[in-house]
Image (cartoon, rainbow, N blue to C red):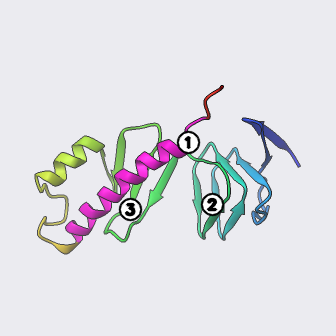
Amino acid sequence: MKTKTINDIEYIIYESGMVLNDAEKSYYFEDDLDYDGDIKCLHFYAVKDVIVRGNQYVGGNQYVRSIYLHLFAKWPFLLDRDSDTIKIGCESKTESEWVSFFANKEKINTDPSDRNYKKLESAFNVARQMKAHLVLMNDKPKAE
């Protein structure tokens, strides 16, 4: 089993077929991951895309670059830690462009008076908070 140390944390480098269900172990993902099941671990560090078809229980640090959210809206959201762009469905705009879009009640395949549009706008506000959280949760500890 290969390991990698980052910020004094020893991670097990994930290999295909590993079961991720030990709350005392930390895992590092070098490649894209499409995991069908729950994940339970101490620390989680991904450098590529990760899809988890279950719940994640991470007791310590979780380093991820992007999050794909459905938020019970008509289209999913893709948030990227390293970009100001937020993707809703197949439309990408900066956060400020989306704020303007919803403030002006612009239309993309859904009328602004429609319930789905209102759910999308509400979900966008949640996604903005999640984006801020994504950046914070990936903050590296400062050297003392």
Q: What element carries label 1?
A: loop
Question: Which residue lies at the image location 32% right of the left edge and 62% below the top edge?
Answer: 123
Foreground of the two, 44 or 53: 44
The residue carrying mark 1 is 138
Give the tally of numbered discs: 3
The residue carrying mark 3 is 76
Q: Earlier in the sequence, mark 1 or mark 3?
A: 3
In the rendered structure, the answer to whether residue 83 lies left or right of residue 58 reads: left
- Dot 1 crowding, Cα within 10 Å, few <14, some 14–19, many 20+: some
Spatial distance from mark 1 to mark 2, Cα to Cα? 21 Å
The residue carrying mark 2 is 34
The span picked out in magenta is: 116-140
Specify the quadrant of the image occupied by residue 47: top right
Q: What element carries label 3?
A: loop
In the rendered structure, the answer to whether residue 115 lies left or right of residue 87 reads: left
Question: Which residue lies at the image location 57% right of the left edge and 47% below the top edge?
Answer: 64
The quarter of the image holding the C terminus is: top right
Q: Are marks 2 and 3 in contact (CB under 8 Å)?
A: no
- Dot 3 crowding, Cα within 10 Å, few <14, some 14–19, many 20+: some
Q: Position of residue 124 (x, y in %)?
A: 30, 57
Q: Where is residue 22 in the image (x, y as percent from the top left)?
A: 79, 63
Is residue 9 shown above or below 107? above
Q: Which amino acid does the dot numbered 3 rest on?
A: Pro
Foreground of the two, 98 or 30: 98
Question: Which residue lies at the image location 24% right of the left edge and 61% below the top edge?
Answer: 121
Residue 84 magenta: no
Spatial distance from mark 2 to mark 3, Cα to Cα? 17 Å
Q: Which of marks 1 and 2 is nearer the N terminus?
A: 2
- Dot 2 crowding, Cα within 10 Å, few <14, some 14–19, many 20+: few
Q: Which amino acid does the dot numbered 1 rest on?
A: Asn
Q: Is mark 2 on a helix, strand or loop?
A: strand
Q: Do the residues labelled 1 and 2 touch (CB within 8 Å)?
A: no
